């Protein structure tokens, strides 16, 4: 089996992770591209002691670490609230461990392999990240979801995380109208809506009015993560786990430190 064939099932997900880590589609995709090129050129190899998916993420992290990539330093940013500053001070390693386990579903042992460290260190990194994430500033959330049970689950989880749900829209028009009446600090949007309209189109129209972080929800992530067109940076796959939603919300808010001014 060729290298590409072995890695193909995992590429959409390592690209999703790279985007969550960097907060930008182009930057994340570029890191994945460099990792694949290094594998193709023989500069890096998949470890035979790891599963293909774990080995791919391990190579990605080797590339990421070798560039000296760091998160943005918030010390010089003006007009950023204290909660956002705390988030920006989370160490890269803590965020990586948290994302690998909460967003990507790796076990602490697998995350330890990816990060070339011990499982107990990964658990400590996760706890450190979680402590800072729990201190995150709450925001107003608009949910765009046409399935009542799912929207209720999302609403309950969002409120448990300390956020305020300003509305639940089931169609494109309802979503746009909701934003016109109250600007949210975060949007959680399904792809396919009740009247056959598109959640993506609704978000495009919302973003014409305000700059707000968006998390898409879909049962078919492979249909969006194709590399053939602009894609969402933050994506939750149905059926979702509470930890996955929490990780995605934290990341989306992390990379929009000006959200409070936008929602004012």
Image (cartoon, grey):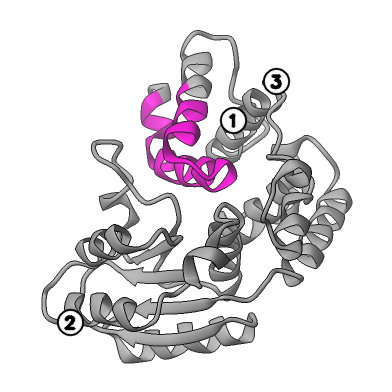
Looking at marks 3 and 1 on the same chain, the residue that comes earlier in the sequence is marked by: 1
Q: Residue at the spot x=41%, y=75% of the render?
A: 183
Instruction: Kindly state the secondary structure of the residue where label 3 is placed.
Output: helix
Looking at marks 1 and 2 on the same chain, the residue that comes earlier in the sequence is marked by: 1
Q: Is residue 93 visible?
A: no
Mark 2 highlights which residue?
194
Residue 204: image quadrant is bottom left
Q: Nearer the viewer, residue 178 or 76?
A: 76
Q: Nearer the viewer, residue 105 or 189?
A: 189
In the drawing, what numbered circle is on residue 111? none
In the image, which is nearer the foreground, mark 1 or mark 2?
Answer: 2
Residue 248: image quadrant is bottom right
Looking at marks 2 and 3 on the same chain, the residue that comes earlier in the sequence is marked by: 3
In the image, residue 117 sits, relative to residue 190, either above or below, namely above
Check if mark 2's residue and mark 3's residue have beta carbons within 8 Å.
Answer: no
Mark 1 highlights which residue?
60
Residue span colored magenta: 4-33
Q: Residue at the spot x=72%, y=51% of the render?
A: 88
Mark 3 highlights which residue?
66
Instruction: Kindly state the secondary structure of the residue where label 1 is placed.
Output: helix
10 Å neighbourhood of mark 1: few (<14), some, or many (≥20)? many
């Amino acid at each position: 089996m060729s290298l590409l064939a072995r890695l193909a099932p995992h590429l959409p997900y390592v690209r999703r992770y790279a985007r969550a880590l960097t907060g930008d589609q182009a930057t994340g995709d570029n890191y994945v591209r460099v990792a694949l090129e290094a594998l193709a050129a023989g500069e890096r190899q998949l470890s035979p002691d790891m599963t293909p998916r774990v080995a791919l993420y391990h190579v990605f992290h080797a590339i990421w670490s070798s560039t000296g990539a760091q998160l943005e330093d918030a010390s010089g940013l003006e007009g950023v609230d204290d909660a956002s500053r705390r988030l920006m001070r989370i160490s890269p390693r803590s965020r990586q461990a948290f994302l690998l386990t909460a967003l990507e579903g790796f076990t602490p042992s697998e995350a330890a392999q990816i990060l070339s460290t011990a499982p107990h260190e990964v658990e400590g990194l996760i706890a450190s990240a979680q402590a800072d994430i729990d201190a995150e500033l709450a925001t107003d959330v608009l949910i765009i979801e046409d399935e009542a049970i799912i929207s209720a689950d999302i609403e309950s989880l969002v409120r448990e995380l300390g956020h305020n749900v300003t509305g639940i829209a089931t169609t494109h028009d309802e979503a746009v109208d909701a934003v016109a009446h109250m600007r949210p600090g975060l949007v959680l949007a399904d792809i396919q809506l009740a009247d056959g309209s598109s959640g993506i189109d609704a978000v495009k129209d919302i973003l014409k009015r305000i700059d707000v972080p968006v998390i898409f929800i879909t049962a078919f992530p492979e249909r969006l993560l194709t590399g053939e067109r602009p894609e969402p940076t933050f994506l939750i796959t149905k059926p979702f786990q509470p930890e996955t939603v929490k990780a995605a919300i934290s990341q989306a808010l992390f990379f929009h430190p000006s959200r409070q001014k936008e929602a004012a």
